[in-house]
Amino acid sequence: MMPIGPTLFSRYVFRQVASAFLLILLTLTGIVWMATALKQLDLLTSKGQGILLFLHMTMLTLPSLIGLIAPNAVLMSVLYTLDRMNSDSEVIVTAASGGTIWRIGSALLTLAAIVSACILLINVFVTPASSRALRDLILEVRTDLISQVLQPGRFSSPMTGLTFHIRDRDDSGDMLGLLVHDERDPETTMSYLAKRGRILKHDGDAYLVMFDGQVHRSNNGETDKGVQIVDFDQYMLNISTFSPTGDSDRTLKPKELSLWELLNPDPENVKGGMGKIRSELHERLSSPLYPMLFTFLAVSVLGHARTTRQGRWGPIMFVVGTAVAIRIAGITMTNLVALNPWAAVPLYAIPIAAILVAAWAAHVRMAPELRSKWSLDLKSKLPNIKFGIARGIKAK
């Protein structure tokens, strides 16, 4: 019978850990995605948008979710694979056959390297593009709020204190018999009446152009609540501002910038200034280190053969606790980078140093033939050591 070669065995281990990784990644991503999607559910209920738009908006958040969840999924899948292989005595058989546990660890590190490369690609290319697409889609929903959502003969309130009503639409899509009641300002109430209205878009903003109408203005804080009426032939409102506070801001978020824009930033057009830009840049480049770190850490603790009498949960909890502590330290350094550029040094040094320490520990614990050699040397020298101790005691 032909023996199972290292390549075939490595493929077997890789299939085991890869299938576990995909299952965990899909499960965790699905749970987080559903929680995120529920926040956008008002698009279907109060704003009358379709299910396709709802799915489109929520799907654009998946790349950033995958980038955050993937390192944790790697850790969980590696722990599960090593624990299962120890329970099935596969690690013990591998060690007893004369092979090092690196035959198992190489497959695990291959998966970690693939995930790290994917996270880097997601951070550099996919997440900025999806974030900008989501921003543009939100703007499109906001600008199409009147022209698409409002139904003739119905009062609609896209936000608190703002009410729209149209009597009908003509064949060109213009709104007929338009009413806009704006009481968002606690001191002033504005009412716009127009025979006809139209939506125009320019430079990323949307405007409601009203024809042949009146503006009714009343000051709520005055004792004399008289209404000021102004007739107009044409009046324009920027409906991009008809959204919660902050949504109309045209400045970009750091996560919406490409890698080139982060390296050559314009702080005036980015929220948070240079500190947030610097923090986002280093977070994108440092986060791919953690799948490799988590894998080396798990292999160094669980990669050696263990008997069934040894506790299973103690080493697992130690690995999880250490991984969480290192990740928290990395997140802390990421936040400090926004305040001090020198914090970028420990931001990279922490995971790299942890990888080196875990790799060294894994090498020491995962080389049974080396430990056996040390044991044989010690046994060969043990009689001489005992004889020397006996002579010393007799001399006394």
Image (cartoon, rainbow, N blue to C red):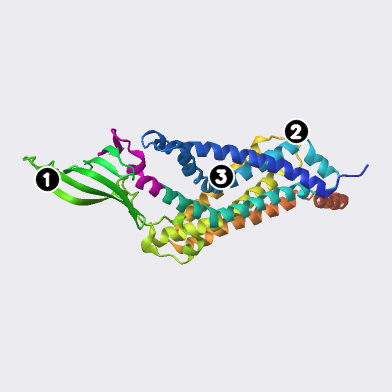
Would residue 369 be counted in the magenta stretch? no
Identify the residue at image location x=69%, y=47%: 299
| Residue 268, picture quadrant | bottom left
- The three-letter amino acid code for the residue at tag 1 is Ile
Within-10-Å neighbours for mark 3: few <14, some 14–19, many 20+:
some
Residue position for label 3: 69
Spatial CA span between label 1 and label 3: 57 Å
Q: What is the secondary structure assignment of the residue under circle 2?
A: loop
| Residue 13, picture quadrant | top right
Within-10-Å neighbours for mark 1: few <14, some 14–19, many 20+:
few
Number of numbered discs visible in the structure rendering: 3
Look at discs 3 and 2 and give the one toward the viewer.
3
Look at discs 1 and 3 and give the one toward the viewer.
1
Q: What stretch is highlighted in magenta?
A: 138-164
With respect to residue 277, does 240 lie above or below?
A: above
Look at discs 2 and 1 and give the one toward the viewer.
1
Residue position for label 1: 229
Identify the residue at image location x=24%, y=52%: 236
Label placed on residue 308: 2
